[in-house]
Image (cartoon, helix red, strand yellow):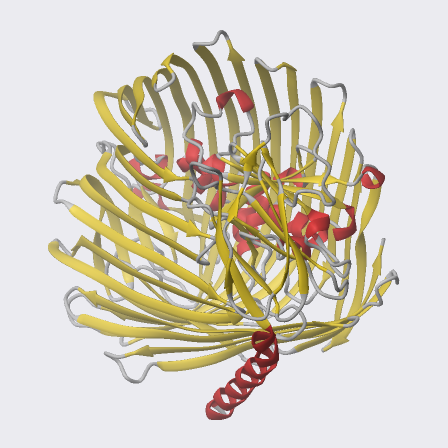
């Protein structure tokens, strides 16, 4: 079957290539430079208007060397115009029959105050960090959504998922008329804003949502700002999808949007059992601040990413799924200075999951464990956020937001584990009730030309109340828990976890000179945590066997305070910016177990940082970052009584733990060249741990007892990743490659050993860029991974993928195909593959509100997906079971 798949893909690629032959044979190239009497002109417009109205307009923008390149139809007559702000446009008439070189020389407009009469609107204007595209200069009228417009803009790319690249950089925020759309969500806007509403598209480089901080903070983010046509300043758009299919599948999916200059209202909903989520983890992270939040507060970003709701959005692999979901967002301009926005997200789902895992235990005498885990989950989440922005003047910016999160999760599952000395089935029951509340305040004030002051404060409160149960007819964790022998075992765990955090930062940006800045910071971070847990056994006679008599159970309090001062000096030499910095921290923390004596600790530390950035030009940059980092242990790591972590794991904290300490370095280089049609980026990162918190584990079969200790042997990890893409006529090639190395120590059964793992991968791909013919993307990726510990384990992952898009007349056809193989080279018995393929055909007449779609998911009816992972002493090969083939027919009504 695989050979047949390869042959079909080959035929499809050849057919697509055949379609391109007549296009390529009719297309010729006109190139040259645009200059004045002295120098070349960067970002000048070159516009070729055909005399034949059935032929598309050709357009180019000059690069840093003033070069342009036009692709036009052979033998057609064109009026070619070169223009640049402050210069008199120059027009020439040509009928090109072969590749031609033509250089433009523009004369300075000596009377720039007078209007210059030209017969077209300038397609692109460049002003500092803003590139403005006039949409009408590029569209043909057949575009449906914003993504179709963006695909036609020079230097802008849109992938299948709605991610946008502008001049080789990822767009992180979407604005409509200078206001965030649905919280700044790029994908939702790209896939839903109608093309006929768009007047201009602006690419904003070095974007900062607080204008006065631009140039002060190290921003390298890119935003899109959509300017609407006058008749579309107040309108409703979106669509409603209704679908049904086999086996017994259904879908109701409204996407409704209202926009006006003062008010915008957005709603997305789902009622479905197809296993697909229209609101993804990326959408949620963008709601919460996106990549900007990670730069400002990396620990908070990753804590958010690991939250229950984030993990629910991340997981897409179910055997069965029923979802009820709604996301609502409203923004209201109360006055010119005040904006109020709110969002609410609610989700309720019932899911069935199954995972089978082969665990290879590598320590001592190696053995394997086969584990099967099935679970039914009932999840409920509600998240709300209210934000008030007050900007009374260009020198003042205030923002306040409050957020709440309520969740309730219940699950019932079974775990069956088979190892050389054990064959046991365990029923698992878990219930979690959680509540989170937080408030954020941000004040920014431009005190003078030299001083800008910012203040940020946050308060958060979180309460978790989980209960866990393990039921089995065999004894669990022999010799590790004080269990009472009986025919059936009921192990229980109750927890009550409360945490409060307060963070505040006051920062002054002092501009000594245009190229010399001094930044001073004063901050306070404090947290208060209480962790109470009770582990026990329910006996057949109704009595309780409380494990507290054997040092189980915790009533632990942990308080932490970090007061710090920071000094940064930012200066420019030539094209390079440098920013050395040092932060002084005074750490105070205390721990207390039950009624025992409170233990107090303190530490003072200087933490250096250094940043360098070289802007060779706007499309070529080099960045270097160094930072010494510390991490303090969590409350669970400090508790000095035992706690059950799982049916086969017991953990005990260590109240004497201090902090981890490590060096973090990164170097990145980026270059984009529109004239030559290529984009290149490479990034390398290096981390060296000086002291770290390390798990020390005792193994007995699959049973594990772990505690944490301070570990002072150095550990390192290093990675390098690169991407290169180039467009030649109607074909774009890309290659991604990378290398990752990690060396670390493991502490098992009082023995210390040094391990390392290495991964090398490569991913070449190629895709076509036709306007009137099918577009095919095909690629291949292979990963080579080696784990070296007490033994060496090698495995490979391979992925062949192909995507086909064809927009013809009133139809859109899309299909995707992935063939994945996994091979454990060391253990040749583990060799699996699966195919993931989907297809859809959409029909909608250009002037009709009604559309129809037939969609098939998991075309080859694959049963599972394969993956692998590694811990200190286990390599796991897992199969995650997925929904069977789904065929769905949808009716779409466009507003």
Left or right: where does residue 693 sit relative to residue 2?
A: left
Q: Is residue 54 left or right of residue 62?
A: right
The vertical placement of 176 against 537, above or below, is above
The residue at the point 32 percent across, 46 percent down is 668
Position in image of residue 677 (x %, y %): 46, 58
Residue 284 in view: yes
Q: Position of residue 153 (x, y in %)?
A: 61, 52
Q: Is residue 506 above or below residue 277?
A: above
Residue furthest to the top in view is 448
x, y (%) of residue 97? 59, 70
Along the viewing direction, whichever of 32 and 602 lies nearer the viewer? 32
434 lies left or right of 481 = right
Residue ID at (46%, 13%): 452
Q: Nearer the viewer, residue 255 or 661?
A: 255
Residue 823 placement: quadrant: bottom left
- Which quarter of the picture shows residue 248? bottom right
Q: Where residue 171 appears, x then y in whole percent?
A: 53, 45
């Amino acid at each position: 079957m695989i050979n047949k798949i390869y042959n079909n893909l080959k035929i499809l690629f050849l057919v697509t290539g055949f379609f391109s032959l007549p296009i390529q044979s009719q297309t010729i190239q006109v190139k040259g430079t645009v200059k004045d009497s002295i120098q070349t002109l960067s970002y000048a417009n070159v516009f070729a208007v055909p005399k034949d109205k059935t032929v598309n307009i050709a357009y180019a923008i000059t690069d840093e060397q003033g070069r342009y390149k036009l692709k036009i139809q052979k033998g057609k007559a064109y009026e070619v115009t070169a223009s640049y702000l402050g210069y008199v446009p120059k027009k020439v008439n040509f009928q090109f029959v072969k590749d031609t070189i033509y250089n433009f020389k523009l004369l300075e407009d000596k009377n720039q105050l007078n209007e210059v009469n030209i017969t077209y609107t300038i397609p692109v204007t460049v002003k500092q960090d803003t590139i403005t595209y006039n949409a009408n200069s590029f569209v043909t009228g057949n575009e449906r959504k914003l993504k179709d417009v963006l695909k036609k803009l020079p230097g802008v790319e849109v992938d299948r998922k709605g991610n946008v690249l502008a001049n080789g950089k990822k767009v992180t925020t979407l604005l409509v008329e200078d206001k965030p759309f649905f919280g700044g969500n790029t994908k939702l806007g790209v896939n839903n804003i109608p093309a006929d509403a768009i007047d201009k598209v602006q690419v904003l480089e070095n974007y900062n949502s607080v204008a006065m901080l631009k140039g002060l903070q190290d921003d390298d983010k890119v935003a899109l700002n959509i300017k609407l046509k006058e008749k579309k300043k107040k309108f409703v758009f979106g669509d409603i999808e209704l679908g049904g299919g086999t086996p017994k599948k259904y879908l109701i999916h409204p996407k409704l949007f209202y926009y006006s200059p003062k008010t915008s209202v957005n709603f997305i909903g789902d009622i479905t059992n197809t296993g697909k989520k229209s609101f993804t983890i990326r959408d949620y992270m963008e709601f919460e601040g996106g990549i900007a939040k990670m730069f400002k507060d990396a620990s908070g970003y990753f804590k958010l990413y690991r939250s229950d709701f984030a993990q629910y959005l991340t997981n897409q692999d179910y055997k069965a799924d029923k979802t009820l979901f709604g996301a609502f967002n409203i923004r209201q301009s109360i006055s010119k200075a005040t904006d109020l926005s709110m969002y609410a997200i609610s989700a309720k789902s019932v899911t069935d999951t199954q995972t089978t895992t082969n665990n290879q235990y590598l320590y001592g005498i190696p053995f394997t464990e086969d584990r099967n885990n099935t679970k039914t989950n009932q999840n409920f989440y509600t998240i709300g956020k209210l934000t008030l922005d007050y900007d009374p003047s260009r020198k003042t910016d205030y923002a306040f937001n409050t957020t709440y999160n309520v969740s309730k999760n219940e699950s019932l599952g079974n775990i069956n584990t088979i190892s050389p000395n054990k064959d046991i089935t365990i029923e698992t029951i878990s219930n979690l009730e959680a509540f989170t509340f937080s408030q954020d305040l941000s004040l920014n004030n431009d005190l003078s030309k030299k001083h800008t002051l910012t203040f940020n404060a946050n308060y958060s409160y979180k309460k978790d109340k989980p209960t866990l149960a393990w039921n089995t007819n065999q004894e669990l964790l022999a010799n590790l828990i004080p269990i009472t022998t009986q025919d059936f075992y009921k192990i229980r765990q109750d927890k009550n976890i409360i945490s409060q955090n307060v963070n505040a930062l006051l920062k002054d940006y002092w501009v000594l000179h245009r190229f010399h800045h001094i930044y001073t910071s004063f901050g306070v971070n404090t947290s208060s945590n209480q962790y109470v847990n009770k582990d026990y056994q329910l006996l057949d006679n109704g009595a309780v066997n409380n494990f507290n008599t054997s040092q189980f159970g915790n009533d632990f309090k942990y308080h932490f305070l970090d007061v710090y001062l920071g000094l940064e000096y930012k200066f420019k030499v030539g094209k390079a910016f440098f920013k050395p910095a040092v932060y002084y921290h005074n750490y105070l923390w205390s721990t207390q177990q039950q009624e025992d004596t409170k233990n107090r600790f303190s530490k003072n530390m200087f933490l250096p940082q250094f940043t360098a950035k070289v802007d060779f030009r706007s499309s070529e940059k080099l960045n270097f970052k160094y930072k010494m980092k510390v991490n303090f242990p969590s409350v669970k790591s400090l508790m000095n009584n035992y706690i059950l972590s799982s049916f086969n794991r017991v953990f005990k904290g260590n109240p004497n733990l201090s902090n981890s300490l490590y060096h973090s370095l990164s170097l990145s280089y980026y270059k984009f060249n529109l004239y030559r049609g290529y984009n290149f980026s490479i990034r390398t990162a290096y981390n060296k741990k000086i002291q770290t918190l390390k798990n020390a584990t005792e193994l007995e079969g699959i049973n594990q007892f772990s505690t944490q200790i301070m570990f002072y042997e150095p550990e390192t990890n290093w990675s390098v990743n690169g991407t290169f893409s180039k467009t030649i006529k109607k074909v774009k090639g890309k290659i991604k490659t990378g290398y990752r190395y990690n060396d670390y120590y493991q502490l098992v059964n009082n023995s210390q050993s040094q391990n390392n793992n290495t991964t090398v991968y490569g991913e070449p791909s190629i895709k076509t860029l036709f306007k009137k013919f099918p577009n095919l993307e095909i690629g291949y990726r292979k990963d080579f991974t080696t784990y070296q510990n007490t033994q060496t384990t090698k495995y490979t992952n391979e992925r062949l993928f192909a995507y086909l898009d064809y927009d013809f007349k009133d139809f859109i056809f899309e299909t995707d195909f992935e063939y994945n193989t996994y091979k454990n080279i060391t253990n040749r018995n583990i060799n699996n593959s699966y195919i993931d393929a989907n297809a859809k055909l959409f029909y909608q007449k250009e002037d009709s509100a009604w559309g129809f779609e037939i969609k098939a998911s998991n075309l080859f009816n694959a049963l599972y997906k394969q993956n692998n992972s590694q811990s200190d002493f286990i390599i796991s090969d897992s199969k995650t079971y997925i929904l069977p083939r789904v065929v769905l027919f949808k009716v779409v009504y466009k507003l």
